[in-house]
Amino acid sequence: MERSWAGLLAAAALLLALPLAGSSSGGDLAWVTCGSTIKLAHEGSKFRLHSHEVAYSRGSRQQSVTAFPDSDDANSYWAVHGTKDEPCAPGSPVKKQQRLRLQHVATRRWLHSHLFQSPLSANQEVSAFGGDSQSDGGDVTLRHVDTGAFLHSLRHATFGHPIAGQHEVCAIKTKGPDSQWFAAEGVYLPRADKKAKAAGGGDASERDEL
């Protein structure tokens, strides 16, 4: 039986104000907001959370999720959504402990987990599942509700053909250095609250403290 995930965001990885891709230090900052399309980078390896139309050969046999070495691959983009029960408006900033779903942009499947074993390390499998019209409680990000497992990547667990060189992504019970992710390249929707404040005559350059 597939189990639920929730966006209890490990190390506030999606909550930080991050430099836009290509900006210099001290330049404009991009907040992760609902409706944004982003890449998640693994803190240790700098590989990007990734998926593709390659299914696991065992376990769930759903679409595989890996960590990919290059930063410029389109199959590493994920769209940020709220849950069915807790939707979030486009442009609303992601908050701590907010429940979210990540949808793989290229294939429209959702970041997902369940109690199948991952193929290389025998941890908890992470897959991509469903589509625009099919989503369930197993879809969200970073920490699993029922098991408490964290999204994780193992640098020593590397796939061979047909996804050679990509690292396994799994879920584990203990949060550690290899369960840290940060928001990297992407298209970040402007914060709706800042736009409203600017329209009302407020200082749109203000930035909230976390």
Image: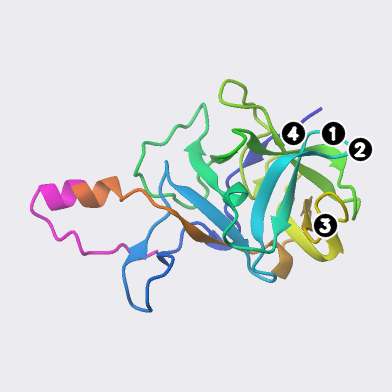
Q: Are marks 1 and 2 in contact (CB under 8 Å)?
A: yes
Q: Which mark is residue 164?
A: 3
Relative to residue 195, is residue 39 drawn left or right?
Answer: right
Q: Which mark is residue 3?
A: 4
Instruction: Tell which circle, 4 or 3, labels the residue nearer the N-terminal end.
Output: 4
Residue 195, given in percent of the width and then of the height, sits at 21, 49
Q: CA distance from mark 1 to mark 3?
A: 18 Å
Relative to residue 52, is residue 39 drawn left or right?
Answer: left
Q: Are marks 4 and 2 in contact (CB under 8 Å)?
A: no
Q: CA distance from mark 4 to mark 3?
A: 29 Å
The kind of residue on which mark 3 rests is Ala
Q: State which mark lies toward you, 2 or 3.
A: 3
- Residue 61, placed above or below residue 80: above
Q: State which mark lies toward you, 1 or 4.
A: 1
The kind of residue on which mark 4 rests is Arg
Residue 200 is one of the magenta-drawn residues: yes
Q: Residues within 10 Å of mark 3 (few under 14, many from 20)?
A: few
- Label 1 sits on residue: 61
Residue at the extreme left of the image, as rendered: 201
Q: CA distance from mark 1 to mark 4?
A: 16 Å
- Label 2 sits on residue: 58
The kind of residue on which mark 1 rests is Arg
Span colored in magenta: 196-210
Q: Residues within 10 Å of mark 4 (few under 14, many from 20)?
A: some
Q: Closest to the observer: 137 or 102? A: 102
